[in-house]
Amino acid sequence: MKIKVGVLLLALLSGCDNSPEPEKGFAGLGHQAEAFIPVVPGRVFNFPLDHGPHDGFRIEWWYVTANLKDDQGQEFGAQWTLFRSALKATPEQSGWSNQTIWLGHAAVTSATVHHAAERYARGGVGQAGVSLAPFKAWIDDWHFSSQATDEDPLADLQLSARDKAFNYQLRLTSTRPLVLQGDKGFSQKSEQGQASYYYSQPFFQASGTLEIDGKTYTVSGPAWLDREWSSQPLTANQTGWDWFALHLDSGDQVMLYRMRQKDGAPYLTGTWIDAHGQTQLLQADDISLTPQDTANVAGRAMPVSWSIKIPGKHLDITIGALNPKAWMDLRIPYWEGPVQLSGSHGGQGYLEMTGY
């Protein structure tokens, strides 16, 4: 469950007046969206078509995180995200009449450094977009594009982003199947039924180069792609979330998210993905997710260490941030960075925390 900032971006770009706004949840994502297509159970996914944009839905994203090491074992993280936000529910127009806003986020993290950057674009003029045959997602000179020549456009991809303080060029490959999150791709976010369509490719292997502050490293490691689209993924009562994507040394993968609320207990769910790509939906009763140590980050107390227990899978681990200061100091700020696992299972992963 990745950060979904597009709805707030729409508000910023659409102007405002002095009238008080009703509560809309974190980043405006609880705002009612009657004109857009609702997310309902039972969707039949269609690949490769679903790798592309979805007209009629208000918000979607292409989101990659990678846990990387160099030849000396030094650890890094890389993030690449493209958000698509629709200003209107009508069919997409061409040129400057286009009603789509694109937003890109990219970041790199080491144990001592974290750099983040963002890009904005209007749709319809070629500055950003997603196309199929071949698959390509881009904003300015940031690219996530297929190198595959067979029927699976996600089998072999090139990922690149650059800013003043960083640059990475990564190749992502996988022969494993895609994973439908939640109930066959219907990912519920609240007891009231808010949801997204959500699938992942958690089995990527990444390799390439990463440059931080003028120094270049040859790196490799596991990577994770998330694809989600929705029209109203949150309720107005939900203030933010904690999202975990974990690569276990056993070959299994785990996705968890905890949706925090102003009133009541958090909404907690996840997916256990075995080494062959078979999934099991995890309910709140299956999971114990407890914040441990906090760090003062950008004037906020951030829980950068967590205890995670899934007794039915004999999982009892502690995760800790590679760099507790992995604050995305962007127009809409949040925390996101690589984590390390210890306890019953070793491994690595990514943690995102919003709304603190």
Image (cartoon, rainbow, N blue to C red):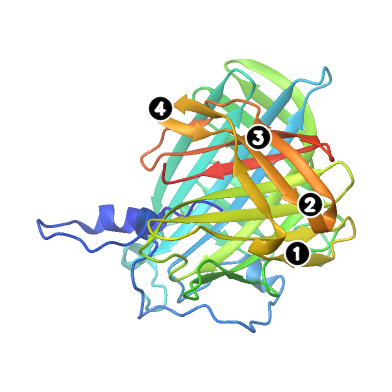
Q: Is residue 85 left or right of residue 193?
A: left
Residue 110 coordinates in the image, percent (x, y): 64, 23
Under mark 3, the amino acid is Pro
Quarter of the figure with the N terminus: bottom right
Q: Is residue 68 left or right of residue 292?
A: right
Q: Secondary structure under badge 1?
A: strand
Mark 2 residue crowding within 10 angstroms, few (<14) / some (14–19) / many (20+):
many
Residue drawn 69% across and 54% down?
255
In front: mark 1 or mark 4?
Answer: 4
Residue drawn 58% across and 63% down?
228
Residue that numbered label 4 is attached to: 298
Q: Secondary structure under badge 4?
A: loop
Q: Earlier in the sequence, mark 1 or mark 3?
A: 1
> Is the C-beta separation of discs 1 and 2 under 8 Å?
yes
Residue 268 coordinates in the image, percent (x, y): 59, 59
Residue drawn 42% across and 73% down?
92
Q: Is residue 318 visible?
A: yes
Q: Nearer the viewer, residue 96 or 79?
A: 79
Mark 4 residue crowding within 10 angstroms, few (<14) / some (14–19) / many (20+):
some
Count of all numbered marks drawn on residues in the image: 4
Residue 126 coordinates in the image, percent (x, y): 46, 55
| 129 lies above or below 180 | above
Mark 1 residue crowding within 10 angstroms, few (<14) / some (14–19) / many (20+):
many
Residue that numbered label 2 is attached to: 253
Residue that numbered label 3 is attached to: 338
Q: Is residue 314 left or right of residue 287?
A: right
Residue that numbered label 1 is attached to: 179
Q: CA distance from mark 1 to mark 3?
A: 21 Å
Q: Earlier in the sequence, mark 4 or mark 3?
A: 4
